[in-house]
Amino acid sequence: GQQLNQSPQSMFIQEGEDVSMNCTSSSIFNTWLWYKQEPGEGPVLLIALYKAGELTSNGRLTAQFGITRKDSFLNTSASIPSDVGIYFCAGGDDKIIFGKGTRLHILP
Amino acid sequence: EAEVAQSPRYKITEKSQAVAFWCDPISGHATLYWYRQILGQGPELLVQFQDESVVDDSQLPKDRFSAERLKGVDSTLKIQPAELGDSAMYLCASRKGPTSGNTIYFGEGSWLTVV
């Protein structure tokens, strides 16, 4: 069946650093979504992508829908403490599946 | 801003008991999803509704789980009997339609602990 591979699994960075994470799928997707989840809460949508090659920004976040339609990446610039959490990619069309998440930690 | 409503927020139940979760999607959203999220993992799709019809329940453990959306609006997910391995967060999500271009929005989730 369809699978999503999200990497890295976790990241430890200094405040102010830029962050990059990505997702690849075994099949072509028509939708890529990026969510952030904090402990005890449901995922909150960060960016939605619907067209191959699309590059979309939301504040310090930028995400791109890969040309092959089998990958997507999310970048965060100048990380701040409140960026800590788990970032999930999700993709598909009618059925949406999730990656296993990238856990972002900011070192004091 | 309209939200997906879920209840209860937290539920502790004993093994072999029945438990039910309720979801009210964003008004006008025809597609409703139930996901299960085990701690440390990504959400896993259990069932997808289009209006009142089930369009995908291939990952729903049908021997103990059931889901319904009788009037095509709110939905109930039931587990009977609950097992220890069912401890997880159950997330409901909704989408305006089944096609690309409609974003999926999640509720806050219902945490289930089976003891």
Image (cartoon, coloured by chain):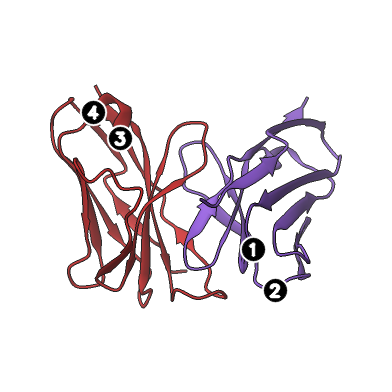
The kind of residue on which mark 4 rests is Glu
Query: In front: mark 4 or mark 3?
Result: 4
Which residue does the numbered mark 4 point to in the structure image? B83
Residues at discs 1 and 2 in contact (Cβ within 8 Å):
no
Q: Amino acid at mark 1?
A: Ile
Number of the front mark, 1 or 2? 1
Amino acid type, residue under disc 2 in the picture: Lys
Q: Which mark is residue A51?
A: 2
Say what secondary structure mark 4 lies in. Answer: loop
To which residue does mark 1 refer?
Answer: A28
Distance of mark 3 from mark 1, alpha carbons? Answer: 34 Å
Chain letter, colour red: B
Q: CA distance from mark 3 to mark 2?
A: 37 Å
Q: Secondary structure at mark 1?
A: loop
The chain letter for the residue carrying disc 1 is A
Estimate the x, y position of residue B102 in percent, counting from the top left.
Answer: 52, 73
User: What colour denotes chain A?
Assistant: purple
Write down the quadrant of residue B25 in the picture.
bottom left
